[in-house]
Image: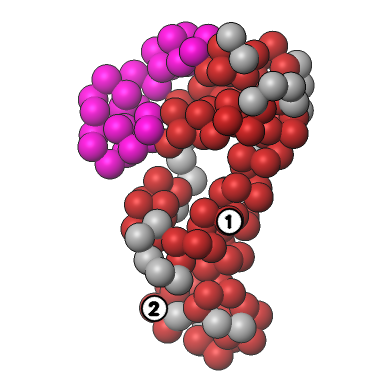
Amino acid sequence: VREIAGRAGVNAALVNRYYGSKRGLFEAAVAESFTVGDLLVGDRATLGERLARYLAGRRRAGFDPTLVVLRSASSPEAGPLLREALDRQVVRPLAAWLDGPDAEARAGLVVSLLFGVAVSRDVLGVSALGADHSEALTPPLGPFLQRLIDGG
């Protein structure tokens, strides 16, 4: 907490006052960072393309959600918080929006595919998925995602 407070230019007591603990701070960061947001606004027939464009887009400076997941998933304290947040804020809303047969499984597959591409690009450094090729990512990935979305 002291290191985070230092980077933010405040003292640790202020961070603890607003977030209560290191756990509270982590929960707040996850709540803000892992959400489907406005991606579900729009035509269902173009969701695959919107998700692919989002994945191919620029990342927020100084924050890498892929690394947060990788570093936190195996933590006995942070892992369950992260899994619950992803389920509550991404998978369940997507499944509800998809509706129909196997909506929850399809939503889980969509999230898994997006995460897999993000890990390949951001962690493993697969050059074909990098910034130089971000526009090339959408045409093949969008229809693939759309098949999962449509249940086909």
Residue, disc 1: 84
Q: Quadrant of the C terminus?
A: top right
Where 30 falls versus 56 (above or below)? below
- Element under disc 1: helix
Indicate left or right for 90 with 57 as reference: right
Indicate left or right for 11 with 129 as reference: right
Q: Residue at x 58, y 26 (%)?
A: 106
Q: Residue at x 23, y 37 (%)?
A: 124
- Element under disc 2: helix
* Prevailing secondary structure class for the magenta stretch in the rendered image: helix
Give residue 51's quadrant in the image. Answer: top right
Residue, disc 2: 3
The magenta stretch spans residue 6: no
User: Mark 1 is on which residue type?
Assistant: Glu
Residue 107 in the image: state x and y as whole percent: 59, 31
Nearer the observer, 91 or 71: 91
Nearer the observer, 90 or 95: 95
The magenta stretch spans residue 142: yes
Mark 2: give few (<14), some (14-19) or many (20+) Cα within 10 Å.
Answer: few
Nearer the observer, 69 or 63: 69
Which residues make up the magenta segment?
A: 116-144
Is residue 103 something that shows in the picture?
yes
